[in-house]
Amino acid sequence: MKHLPIQSSIESDGQQPIPSCDDDPTTIDATSRTQDGHWESDATFEEIRNCIGKSFAGTDVVPGEPLVSWAGSHLKNLKGYTMEQHQETCKFVLGFPVFEDLKLKNTFVVAKKEYTGENVGSTGELASAAVIKEYDPFKKTNGFFPKVATFWRTKMAILTMSRQSPIPALFADKNKREAAKNLEKKMMAAISVLDKAHKEEGPQHPHWYVHLVAVNPAFNGRGYGRELMEKVNELADNAGVTSYLECGMSNVKFYEKMGYTTQSIKTVEDPINPQDEPGRFALMVRRPQ
């Protein structure tokens, strides 16, 4: 398990530069410092989003991430929509927050790559990954230039992912357009509630926001999730910093075993069908030990 800080694209004055067309996002790498002080590439943006996308999508036998499962519940009845297509959808959708996070100075990744096993390619595959942001609740993010920079990073993310693989069928097929829009509406509804709760109810001091946690379904049941969070805890304890995350109710017990306590529960109403089951998510905090 390696602690993989991300090389920054933010200038020393804190301004977020607008990526140019020459700024190839495929070179965004999770990196670790070797004993001789050099940076060594360990995991690319594509590897990270592949692991997170597969984890959040799940499989026919491994449950997906609760927020995505709730937001995409209507996709189960979508004609011709396969699990393979769902994984491609999640890789695409999750690619945006991964890309955005990795472009920021205050982000790092903890990940583990494996090279053995029936479901793993000969070049290796990430078994687990956590994308973590050093979060300051008092840092101002409003203003014109950060918004423009975010807009351009979104455009660059689309270009990057479209070069790596085709646009998923859910977004490319006009017959699935309504289902895609409903997925977006539900995802944005949940993100809006959770972002607001983080700012208002999360730790009111600088802390680590454990933004995305994933275990590749090919490695499910082998303890990679526990090992990943134990490493995150070790790093947090060494830094003396509080950790914060959000999770679906089905994952609360796991994070409690990892030392987290529930601060509150948030309910998200379905914006498409308000009579349907709402999403419920826990805000959890771990103090350094």
Image: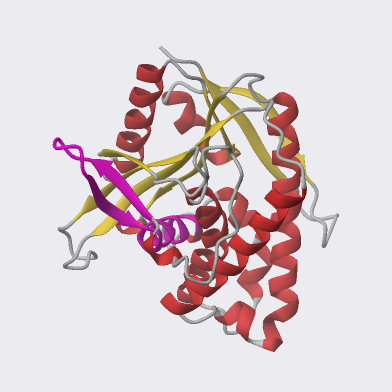
Q: Nearer the viewer, residue 280 or 155?
A: 155
Among all residues in the image, which is located at the extreme top?
Answer: 289
Q: Nearer the viewer, residue 27 or 254?
A: 27
Would you say 55 lies left or right of 207 here?
left
Quadrant including the N terminus: top left
Looking at the rendering, which quadrant does residue 283 occupy?
top right
Looking at the rendering, which quadrant does residue 282 occupy?
top right
Q: Position of residue 217 (x, y in %)?
A: 36, 57
Q: Residue at x 30, y 35 (%)?
A: 227
Q: Which stretch appears magenta?
A: 29-56
Does residue 245 show up magenta in the picture? no
Could you tell me if residue 213 is visible in this image?
Answer: yes
Quadrant including the C terminus: top left
Q: Residue at x 61, y 78 (%)?
A: 170
Among all residues in the image, which is located at the extreme bottom?
Answer: 174
Image: 20 above or below 194: below
Q: Position of residue 220 (x, y in %)?
A: 33, 51
Q: Position of residue 31 (x, y in %)?
A: 30, 47
